[in-house]
Image (cartoon, rainbow, N blue to C red):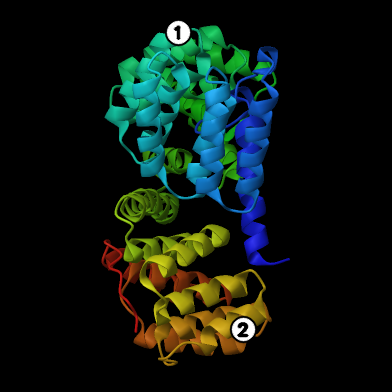
Amino acid sequence: MTRATNLSQAGLAIIAALLLASISCSGPDPAPPAADDSRNQPSEAYIASRDASIALGRSGRFLDAIVQVRDALAEAPDLREPYTLASGFYQEGLNDPGAIKFFDFMTGTMPEKPWPWFYRGFHQARLGRWTKATESFRQAAAILPGDAEILYYLGRAHEEAGDRSAALSQLKRARELDPAGGAIAAALTRLLAFHGELGDAEKVYEDTRMEGNSSPDLLHALGMIRTGQSRLDEAEIAFRNAIRLKPDHLNAHQALERLLERSGRTEEAERQSITTARLEDYEIGHRSWVVAALEDSDSKACLALAELELTEGNVEQAMIWFDRAERLGGTTDRLRAGRAEALFVLDEIDAGDRELAGVRQISDARVALARAVRFLSTEDAGMAQIQLDKAVKSGPEEREFLRRASDLYETTGLHARSIALLERAAEANRSYTAENGE
C-alpha cells in the first residue's frame, strides 16, 4: 500500500469521525461531530451531492468536494451534516483560513442557522483566535440555546481566552443539558477544582464515574481535586494514571511536576520538568508554526512544523507537512533528509534510500541523522552511533535536530550523551529558524 493511499484513508477516517462521533465519549477537544439529522428525511438530490462530496474527498480532491457540499447545502440548509463535511474537507486540506472565509459567507447569507457560526468558531479556535471563536460560539448558542455541545465549546473558548468564570458558567449549563457528557464533565470538574469548589467538583467526578465515563482528562481533574484536599498521594496516582492513558497529557505532566516540587522530591521534579518542558515547547511551537504555515502559506514554516512533528514521533503528520513544504518551496536537501528519516521510521527503507540519493550535500548533518535512523531500523546500533556522532559533530544548534539526536542516543543506550544533547537543545534557538538547506 502506498503512502498516498494511507493518507487518503486517514482523511476518510477523520471525515467518518466527524459524522459519527459523540461528545459524550470523546476527549475535551474533539472534532465537532454531526447531529442526528435522520428525522429530516433528506432529498435524493441532497444524498447524491453528499455522496459525491465524500467520493471526491476519498480521492483527496477537497476543493471539488466542497463544491459538492455547497450543492448539498442548497438542498438541505437545516441539516448539520453538510456543514460538518465542509469543515472536515477544509481540515484535511490544511486550509483553516479558507474554512473561516467559507463559514463567514455562510453566516452572512444564513445568519439564522447555528452551524455556520459553530464551525466558523471551530476553525477560529484551531488557529488560536479565541476572542473571535468565543463570539462565533456565542452566536450559535443564541440560536440554539439548548445544545450542550455548543455551550461546551463556548466554555472552552472562554477558558482559552482567559475568562475562567465565564467558562465555568457555560460548562455548568452544558452539564445540566448533557449529564452523561464525559468531556463536559472533565472540563467542568477541572475548573471547579481550580476555583476551589472542591465539593462540587468531587460530586461531578463521582457522578461521571458512576455513569461509566473515564478519561485522562477526568483523571487529571481528580488529581486537581485531591491536590486541593492535600491528599497528595492520591493526587499523584491520578496524575500518573492520566499520563499512562495519554502520555502527552500536558496538564497532567505540569500538575505532577508541581506536586513533586511541593512534596520536596527535587530530583524527581527535575526529571519530570524535562518531559514537561518538551511538551510545553511542542504545544507552543506547534500552534505558532501551524498558524504561519496555514495563514501565510510559508514553506519554511511547513518544513519546521514537519521536523517538529517528526521529533515528537508524529511521523504521518510530518510527511503531510514535508509534502506541503515541497509544494510551496521546492525540494531541498533538508527536506529530503527529513522525509528520508520519516520513511525509515515507517520502515519504508527503499523509499528513504531514494530520497537520500537525491541529496546534493551528502555530508550534511541531517543526512547523517537520517542514516542513523536507517541503521537503527535494521538493528545496527554500532553504525547508527557512528552516524550520530558524525551528525552531532557538524550539526546545527537547533532544538528539533538536537532533540531527535538525543532520542536516538537514548535508543542506542548512551544515556549521558542523550542528556547532554537535551541540555544543548534547551539553550538552542527557540524560533526553529528554517533554512533552505541547499
Residue occupying the point 59% across, 89% down: 383
Q: Quadrant of residue 420?
A: bottom left
Q: Secondary structure at mark 1?
A: loop
Q: Residue at x 68, y 81 (%)?
A: 379
Q: Residues within 10 Å of mark 2 (few under 14, many from 20)?
A: some
Front: mark 2 or 1 = 1
Distance, label 2 to label 1, CA atoms, is 58 Å
When asked about the image quadrant of residue 112, the answer is: top left
Question: On screen, 104 above or below 95?
Answer: above
Judge by depth and name the residue closer to the eye, 243 or 18: 18
**159 w.r.t. 395: above or below:** above
Q: Secondary structure at mark 2?
A: helix
Read off the residue under disc 1: 145
Q: Amino acid at mark 2?
A: Phe
- Answer yes or no: is residue 239 visible: no
Q: Which mark is residue 253?
A: none
Residue receiving disc 2: 375
Give how far across and how far down residue 16 sits, in percent.
66, 38
Of residues 187 and 114, the one nearer the viewer is 114
Among the two numbered marks 2 and 1 on one chain, the one whose residue lies closer to the N terminus: 1
Q: Left of 102 or right of it: where is 47?
A: right
Whole-percent x, y for residue 352 in the image: 59, 79
Of 438 and 83, the residue lying toward us: 83
